[in-house]
Image (cartoon, rainbow, N blue to C red):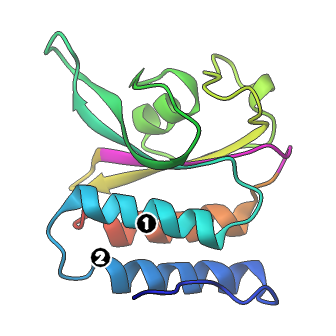
Amino acid sequence: MYDFKPDAALDPAEVHRELLRAADALTAGEPDGIANMANVAALLWEFLPDLNWAGFYRTAPTKVGSGSELVLGPFVGRPACIRIPFGAGVCGAAAESRATQLVADVHAFPGHIACDAASRSELVVPVLRDGAVIAVIDLDSPSPARFGAIDAEGIEGLAALLSDRI
């Protein structure tokens, strides 16, 4: 049995280091990417306070077969949008630009997709393999400006770890 809970007294950078160690322990040697994403979504929920959604969108062919889009993957939170075109909303912007999106106020983000009206801030980090986006890690919070540079760096480290495990 695993009991991954961070010490409440840890500073945010140490929380992210502990999260990375836990994710490494759970995903090392496991070839099933869906199982690894599911466990990591649960870890994100346990380790990071003040979230209302934590999980993954995977890169997949569009329904019509030309090009790629993001498709809902394992997550914790309320039901979510299933398909997001590259370039649409915060997740699509991260996928299209292959760059982290740190959004203090989602209502001020052009084209924001409101899957949960309670979300106020968002952090989305692309997971890259051989330069291509294979997924994004998406964190939403009901608090404005919930995420900062330490969170972005921590989740970028997690994305790098997972790039060959999902």
Q: Residue at x 27, y 62 (%)?
A: 35
Identify the residue at horizontal 25%, vertical 55% (top origin).
Answer: 34
Residue 137 appearing in the image: no
Considering the whole magenta stretch, tell me its main secondary structure.
strand
The amino acid at mark 2 is Thr
Which portion, as a residue range, is magenta? 134-145
Q: Residue furthest front?
A: 1
Distance of label 1 from label 2 (alpha carbons): 8 Å
Above or below for 5 versus 142: below
Residue 153 in picture, x, y percent from top left: 60, 67
Inspect this view and state whether residue 11 appears: yes
Left or right, residue 60 beside residue 159: left
Residue 16 image position (x, y, % from top left) = 61, 78
Quarter of image, res 49: bottom right
Which residue, as the protein is rendered here, is positioned at the far top?
A: 64
Residues at circles 1 and 2 in contact by the CB criterion of under 8 Å: yes
Q: Quadrant of residue 32?
A: bottom left
Q: Residue 31, percent across and down?
A: 14, 69
Q: Magenta segment: does it hold 70?
A: no
Label 2 sits on a secondary structure element that is: helix
Q: Amino acid at mark 1?
A: Val
Locate the N terminus and report the quarter of the image it occupies: bottom left
Label 1: which residue?
40
Marks 1 and 2, the one that precedes in the sequence: 2
Residue 27 — which label?
2
